[in-house]
Amino acid sequence: MLMRTETNVDAAQINDEMLGIEPLTLMLPSELQKETYEVKLTNETNDYYAFIIETHCQQYHARPDQGIASPQSNCSIQITIQAQSTTKDDFIVKSTIVDKDLRAEHITQYMSKKDPNEVDEVPLVVVICNPDTAEALSKDHRRNFHPPQSFSSDHPTNMRYLSRPSDRAMDLATGAMGSLLHKLGELLKECNLEESVKKDIESFSEELMKMQLVLRKLPNVHLNDQDYYLVKRWANNVREMSYDIEDFVDGFLVHSEPTADAGGFRELTHRVFKAHPQISDKIEAIKKQVQDEIQKRKEYNVDNVVANAPAEITDTIVPCMSWVPSFKHHKDLVGIEEQRNELIKRFSDDGDGDGDGDVDVQLKIFSIYGYGGLGKTTLVREVYDKLKVDQFHLRAFVYVGQSPDKKEVIRNILKELIGNNFNAENLNEEQLITKLQRLLENKRYFIVIDDIWDWNIIESVFLGNSCGSRVVITTRVYSVAIACCKNKENVYEMKTLNEQDSRALFVRRIYGTEEEACNDVPEEILTGILKKCGGLPLAIVSIASLLRAKDPWKRSTWDYVRKSLVAMFEGNNPTLKEMEKILDLSYRHLPHHLKTCLLSVGMYREDHEIEKNELLRQWIAEGFVISTTRGLDAEDVAEEYFKELINMSMIQPEKIDYNNEVLSCRVHDIVLDLIRSKAAQENFCLVIDGSKDVRQPPEKVRRVSIHCHRGMDYRALAAAAATSGSLEHVRSVLFWGGRYIFYSFLMLKYVRVLHLEDGGWTSNLDLSSISGLFLLRYLKIACFFFANVKLPSRFEDLQQLETIDVQDASNIPQGILSLPRLSHLNVGICAVLPEGIGRLKSLRTLGCFNLATQSVENIKCLGELTNLRDLTICWRESSDPVDAGMRMEALRSSVGSLSGSLRSLIIGPRCSIQLPVHGWSSAHSLPARNLRKLDLSGCNFDRCPRWIAELRDLYSLRIRVEEVADGVSIVAQLPSLAYLYLECHGGKEEVAVFSGFRALKHLDLDCKNLSLTFHAGAMPRLEKLEIWFRYHISFVTGYFLPRGIEHLPARTLRQICLKVVDTVEQHKSLVRRIFDLAFQPYHPCANITIYFHERIYY
């Protein structure tokens, strides 16, 4: 039996520009053995459509399962169903418009990287039932609905009012409409509502769906001024309405007081709606509000305006172009070498470079001046990295920005010089300055202060000495550049790139190499675009990234970009305002989902380093990202979005590991200005900066970021926050400081994201009241100076929590084990986790798990966390060897049970003792075959375990052994290993031969009694080499030197760091000469640093 069933969704509203599918439902008798059915795909448009048919059921097959439908054509798909009982599963038919030149074998790759909003996903439902009831079912059957599981971003989407699952995500164009329609579909299905209430919800849900379709089209049409004002006002009202209605639905959850064993959305909604008999009145009010917007839509003639308006731009980003990381390696930088070398010469003049501090050279302060986008930070960072570490006793690189706090700046300098363990908890500003000046006294130091706007902030901080110290500042303000130097000769004005360097940077950014180029692009178009960029690196990279994303192989793409630039401004040297227009061009071409994610970045402080995982988890908590039907969960999708923003040069990578994965990012201050301007226009978020006046606030604030500064009146700022529009419906709260206003936000019932960073309080922080934030999904407290953080005793009430990152809480409540969606749990080294950790089945990240404070049984429970990807282990209490051995053996057993999921295992940096690993060395003790990152530096191995050779995906390894023995040969053949740290603390003299290591990029050897030999062809990709030596009489003869230095790859090796311990002052010159003679001839382009280990105690 094969039947087509209709849905309650008007097909004309959805399928006018989609691939037709008939039938949408297959009704199959339960006793079938094996049958084949036909599904027809119809393309009635003038476009080419690629399609893919997917199913997770191994007993269903579709032939063909992918292809391209030409304009005005039909395609038949043969569906084969094997014998089934009463189970059912779906097919997903995915389709999208493609160029006619796309080859069939490239469809999967093309569609997997396509913007989800441009891929239509329609379920082809399979229903297996008793033959006698099949006919009856077919008359009333609608699209398949998955069972509700609250509002998790990873559970299947209710398709009742959505044309495709991706429409469920919240975005800038449609507001909360997608998630709202999903929830309304769930309410109708699950709640015991009166029939009249159901009809009202169905009625306005249909209208909301139609409004969503119009909202999605709006950004892609060009409106005249009069139409723009009216249509824009209507769109803003509808988006705000979607938030309000969703708050109404979620509000019932807030007031429902769920129990710890509540089963999610189904139980909550049944209880909630029975407890609120006045729901019919509220539903009636919503219906009236929707009707008002329908009337305005007619009055403003929205449908006709949108239908007849010319197309503005498309937001398509070409997926087939691979991700190109922003230029972090100096070989990728263009036009910088000459300026870098000039500055290094200036900074090094009058000093002998030995770092001894015995030359009569006074402190010199230099400034690098130029307007935004010229590359000041990139240049000074290159200089900072290039200057040899051993030339200076102390070095620091600190970002400042437009709204600095003096105490904060000084504290950051001290943290850079001393390390993150520096505690400024009880120090005031004057005490911090005194501590810094004492630290710098009689030391040769090199300090960079980046992006400073007021020299008075640090004018009195640096006292002169006669050690050849250097301070470098970057600024956009010429008066600041002059004031800090007191000598115009020390002011360096940034230059724009010349024509040759501009072209090189432009072509590299588009194609990845200067050798590749689009031959179809006339020279005058390329030259015209470059002239408009005026030699500004930021402008060049922005336009190149746009071309790359829009498909640089098409002549039409180049024509469009050139015409856009010509229309923006006259002349070839863009001003700051014109520079912002160039960036705006890139912003306008972002898809809706990327715009939404980008605007959320504007909530962070200027020049703030943003951790990638933190940002991605906030996106998911806010509903900007959801899982897809192509096998990607929400975190995978968020990762793709993050890479696309980097690819478009809207955010800049900061930390990149040796697996080429970006770990953190920054936002250029000009881009940040653009982001905040757009966010204000769209009422996306409100940023309250304690150093600036709050702009005229909107009536309702959905997201708020508060930046407090020390010395400011927090109570006044609290009053400003309270009067800055209605904060009742705030969904995300980000704080930097501000104890007086923080607590007031703990009572806002709609908060999903709560992030407090660097509060600077010395008293306890009581978070007990957050147990009332039933919608809270993301919680991070990162202040480092609290005596203690008190968590709510009824943690089980926070059923939506996905991320908990609280470093200063010592006792974690038992209720945390009742959080079904908790995916990421990061606690401090002193935290005691409750017994039964294995109940957290959704957990992916766990750190820091202190073995010393956990029972052996709880350690064994780790093996039940079958979704765990990242596990960090620490040990922070003394213990007898027998007890430590029992715990480590329990850990080994648990890790072995996580073989299918675990990707990162860290047992190292936070261990106060060397943990015994007697049972870990045997061949059958392989902990997890899929590990990609392994840190065992906190363990005490006799030798390198042989099972490490089986970790084929491992790219990072840190290990500490008593004896090197055959450890080098064990790890040499690992095909993915990019980073190796090997420490040997035994006293035995040994020999090691390095060959293989085909993927290794960074080698760090702390084996002071090891004689090294590098074979020809070894480590062909090596970029950084670090070797520790101990001073020995063999230094005089050079016998200690590695053999085969000439075999190290000169093409890639750029950094060589040689460290000597247990030496004395008079040996330094001799050691330097020996190292230089050994390494310099074979590696003239490498930055060779010789470091003499001298511990400084504070």
Image: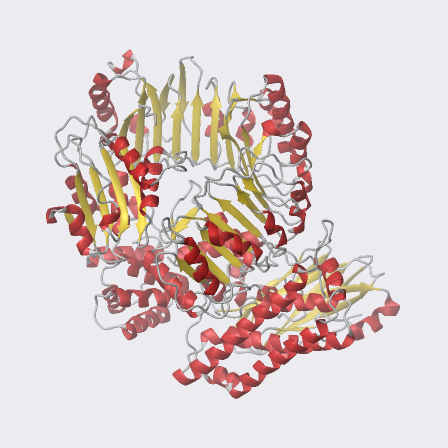
Q: Is residue 21 above or below residue 751?
A: below
Q: In which image quadrant can residue 59 be found?
A: bottom right
Please, which residue is most extreme toward the right here? 132
Q: Nearer the viewer, residue 914 or 10?
A: 914
Q: Is residue 47 visible?
A: no
Position of the C terminus, as image quadrant, is top left
Position of the N terminus, as image quadrant, is bottom right
Q: Nearer the viewer, residue 999 or 583?
A: 583
Residue 701 shown left or right of residue 66 in the figure = left
Where residue 688 appears, as percent x and y from the top left, is: 41, 59
Q: Residue at x 33, y 63 (%)?
A: 543
Q: Is residue 87 visible?
A: yes
Q: Is residue 761 above or below residue 1072?
A: below
Where residue 165 appears, as percent x and y from the top left, is: 61, 64
Where residue 1094 appears, as percent x and y from the top left, is: 31, 23
Q: Residue at x 66, y 46 (%)?
A: 794
Q: Residue at x 64, y 50 (%)?
A: 821
Q: Nearer the viewer, residue 50 or 74?
A: 50
Residue 1083 shown left or right of residue 750 in the figure = left
Q: Residue at x 58, y 69 (%)?
A: 244
Where residue 705 appears, as percent x and y from the top left, is: 45, 57
